[in-house]
Image (cartoon, coloured by chain):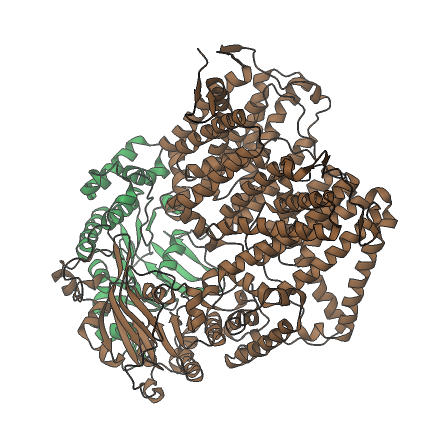
Chain colours: A brown, B green
Amino acid sequence: MVALTFTVPFTHFDIPSEVVILGLITGLAYGLLALGLTLAYRIARVVNFAHGSIGALCALIVPVLVIQEGWPFWPSIVIALLAAMVVGVLIDVLVMRRLLSASRLVAMAATIAIANVLFILSSFLPQVGLGYHRYPLPFNVSIHVGTLTLHTPEVLTLITVPIIVVALMYLLQRTYLGLAIRFSSDNLEAAQLAGVPAPRVSTIAWVLVSLTAAVGAILTSLGQQAGGASPGTNQGVGPELLAVALAASMLGGLNKLPTVFGAGVMMGVAQSVLAWNTTQTGVFELFVFAVILVSLLVQKQLGRLARGASESSWSLTGFLAPLDRTLANHRRVRTARRGLFAGLLVLAVLAPPALGVGRQAVLATVVIYAIIGLSSIVLTGFAGQISIGQFAFVGVAALVAGRLYVAGYPQWVTVLYGIGAGILLALAIGIPALRVRGIFLAVVTLAFGIMVSVYLPDAGWLVKSGATSTEVIPRSKLFGIALQNGRNYYWLCLGFLLLTALIVRRVQSTGIGRSMMAVRDNESAAEALSINPRTVKLTAFALSGAIASLGGFLYGGLVVNFTHSPELFFPGNSLTVLLMVILGGVTTVSGAIIGAVWIVGAPYLLGLQWGLLTSSIGVLLVLLYRPGGVITLLYDVRDRIAQRLVGPVTVPVAADEDEDDVKINEAVAPDAPAAITNGDGARRPAPSDPDDTPLVAEDIVVRFGGITAVNHVSMSARRGEILGLVGPNGAGKTTLFEVMSGAVKPDQGRVYFEGIDITKLPPEQRSQLGLGRTFQHARLFPDLTLKDAFKVALERDERSELFPSLVGLPPSRSAERRKDIRADEVLDQMGLTAWGSRPVSDLSTGLRRLAEIGCVLALNANVMLLDEPTAGLSQREAEAFVPQLRQIQATLESTVIVISHDVPMMVDLVDRLYVLVGGEVIAMGDPRLLQSDPRVIEAYLGTAAAAAADTNGSKGRKGRSRKTSAGGRGKKSESMADA
Amino acid sequence: MSSAREGDPLLSVRGVSYAYGHLQVLFDVSIEVPEQGRVCLLGTNGAGKSTLLNVISGLARPTHGTVLFRGTDITSLRPDERVQAGIGHIAGGRAIFPTGTVYENLKIGTYTFRRQPGLVKERIEEAIDLFPVLGQRLEQKAGTLSGGEQQMVALARAFITGPTLLLADELSLGLAPIIVQQVAAAIVEEIAKRGTTLLLVEQSLSVAFGMTDTAYFMERGQIRFSGSTEELSSRQDLLRSVFLGADRGTSAVLAGSPS
């Protein structure tokens, strides 16, 4: 074979055939890795960070057996593969199966923890002296291809990988097992109903994943140095390789296995060719990042997954109840709190002398990690944006500050520039985050972090100034304090930690933090309360970038002054930060500190292996049994101690009124306050002016694919009326609501609010104008207290400003006080005062629906759209609802539009009624008259005769074919007997 | 509870309660379905009908109560074990695997007896005989079928599992009436031939009354009425009060009904 070189026309870009062949071989390994990751994604909807560690652990078994025990090669391989199978079973049975219904982010965090546990386990294997040997080979060959010589490892890769890939494809495409795995990931319930034993299929699939990982790791280890992983140096498949494989998986839409494999091979070739043509590091990482980002933004199916990922977003946070107010205000409790805080502070300040010089750098590291952890608390804990690229900000700030210091700027100026650089970078990564969510955002931030961390330390303009490198210039003084002293440096870091902690506390307790948490918990509900999720997310990114950069500035100084940790920009550190805050508790300041002390500090106290093992297993236990982190345990202790300090003062427990009578029985129901039957007495005179219409929908058409969900519907609400919207399932009621509130863009038609055309406005601007709405599911903000949920709505009248909030300036403080008072008023008006400090998720459905209406009340909306306000309510709650809504409407003097299936309730409640069937208005007018309208009766009851007689009325509502065609508009709907 | 026939019922649900988190959707529900019975569950949206079917097929674990099938307690069995025991469930919506071909969609239904190739072949052929249109589309991706054909795929697969009790959820949802009639007719004929017992959840009364002879009416997670469909369809007052509201309150009408 002759070596050929292809040069891209008009460039110096050479593509020699040897380079391509070498790239192909690397690519085969990438392809195999990508297949394994895709398979894991398909079974568990998760990015499996443990893939590399599974492989590394199993691959290490071979040299241990061959070199140390004298086993032959192939039996050792068999043992290694058996080990992989066992690992696969354990991962599924011990962890993944238990997290089936958990948030996918929790599952992803679990794989990171599993990765650590396996990694540490592999360090327990006896590997003394292995480093002097090469990884065993079954035979020795060399094949010459042009100028290239391929040795046994390459030859084995070329043979083995295609065989495995073909076998895997066959298994998945042609066998029952493959069918079961594929279909379980498509639709788990339907697969179970077809007779597929879900647990067993999941276990087998994880075994396959583990086997793929093991084979891949063995192939890449062949001929390399045999010394396996030692703790601290993360060998095997680190995040960098994972990102490459993820890029390939994304190219295949995380779905089509042949494409995924092909993309993996292509990534290998691309890497090889890029490396041949450029000396600049970071180009391939940029390529990987670009591939991931572009696949997410361009591929329709992937984009849907990425956006949909938010629905099951970050529910790890749990709810941490603030100490009960009566307890917190008690003198003894306050003294104890202050005492505890002062004690901890004194302990922290006095720690260095007690520990001795060598440990001072460790203490500073813990403190710096706590600061970086706080950046994750803001971004992930508050705003729900998961990032595993925080060390990008750390690295950039360290280098920028260092560069400017070399250039002669004072330290305090370099801090500001470092933070500025971090903020810019954070905004740059925040912009894609506006479209990408959940684990996909995690992948994007991972690739971004890797790109930055590979590029920066090698970027001459940043790292070198003349002959000197910023990385070796000691930072001597800040504000006159000599920093070469380890104790002083630690105190400096401690001071910054205190400052950052105070700021994060401010964020948490003001509108800035509440808006973030609202967006985290429920983006559409936040929009409906005038919160702009884009602004909120970018604020969170900027703030988080700033905090991480501060940590980076300090970390840079630490590394330079004390050469403590050489891996300044190691992307794996970002994973550590994530685990740290999960372990401590992702929504609190203390969580970051506890996490840092445990994860960073434990290895120094217990030794590296045991320290890492306890923290990794700790994280797994937290994820499985204590979502919310170690901090939740401390909160329990706190409550108990406070209770004991105060003594037997009875804490008023919120009245649990609804739990008992959710269940109504037949005998009681008729005697219950029967609002449904006494409608006439309560009916107000209908609003007179039919031309004063605050909300108008004009000729709205909405199509989903071939289905016309709303077909030329016009509707107007008169000022001060309660307007009803009824219709059977699939009539298009909710879609019409979504059009009016801005969540769905109509294909045709306009919406006017108070005379303004709002058709093109996003939801948060509509709510800002005064258009409030509730949701069918009434989820609201599960982890906010009810009072805080109301305060979110109060942002409409008085938006929290960033800087006053952060530093606690008077305008922010007085605004907070006003919101507090107003929220109490709303609680009182809704009769929900007893629930004010309880999390929304503690409320029953009925109370949550009231709470949503309370939010609309706090929003001060002049038109409210209520979607199924009585669904899921008990009979008694439903009956109480009618007078309650009337009263609220009278107080607000607002216009109300209500959707409901419950025709009897509606007849009692509303002034006018629209009846929607199959996307069209079939009747409107006085609700009682409509009860006897034959069209309406038929839509609800149907008659066997009508169904039999009228078979020509199929409107193609579901099927992909027939659209409503000529004469569709205003067509009568005798045919809808099936509705 | 009124079971019209003598002897042990095929299915007996006893005192079942179920909650999604804080939201309780079933309250102490008991129903019985006799061997070869044709029973429907009626009620408005959110009454808990589909949840009850899920409890019977094992997709939902009840918080209280038991499910007996042929006199055996199956409350703790997995869904696939219940399929093996003879419970087939066509879940609401389109219970298909859109990325698989029609043939694969049918084949997955043979999972529990995959080691008997003869039976696999026979069952799939039977299903195609039932819906010949599927036979022409075996290699087509199921996601590209029309709504009616997708429903046929789901039905065919349910029959392939060889159920003695068939649970069908909202067959008519989103289908044109003519398609509903075809599907309904196919089911009625097939269950008569096989002696299958039917438990149907349906919003459309005309469809339900055409296919079943006994009805349970549910409201807000409880059984409010049970009796023959004939009797129910003659009680226009009851139906209207339930779905449209009447002069008397719903509860009052129900209280006077022979429950």
Residue at x-position 24% and y-position 75%: A924
Determine the residue located farthest toward the left in the rendered image: A949
Vertical order, A169 against A863 (above or below)? above
- Marks counted in the figure total 0
- Left or right of residue A342, residue A899 in this image: left
Residue B27, position as x, y percentages in the image: 43, 66
For image coordinates 69% across by 19% down, the residue present is A68
Q: Residue at x 58, y 64 (%)?
A: A512
Choose between A872 and A555: the one closer to the eye. A555
| Residue A444 screen position, x and y as percent | 52, 44
Q: Is residue A591 above or below residue A281?
A: below
Is residue B81 visible in this depiction of the protein? no
Q: Residue A972: image x %, image y %?
A: 16, 67
* A27 displayed left or right of A738: right
Q: Is residue A826 left or right of residue A911?
A: right
User: Percent x, y for residue B246?
Assistant: 27, 79
Figure check: A347 above or below A143? below
Nearer the observer, A857 or A459:
A459
> From what the image shows, is residue B251 above or below residue A584?
below
Is any part of residue A119 visible from this angle? yes
- Of the 4 image quadrants, the one containing the N terminus of chain A is top left
Residue A722 appears in which quarter of the rendering? bottom left
Q: Hey, which quadrant is residue A509 in on the image?
A: bottom right
Quadrant where the image shows the C terminus of chain A? bottom left
The residue closer to the viewer here, B22 or A281, is A281
Q: Residue at x 53, y 67 (%)?
A: A840
**Position of A611 compared to A722: left or right?**
right
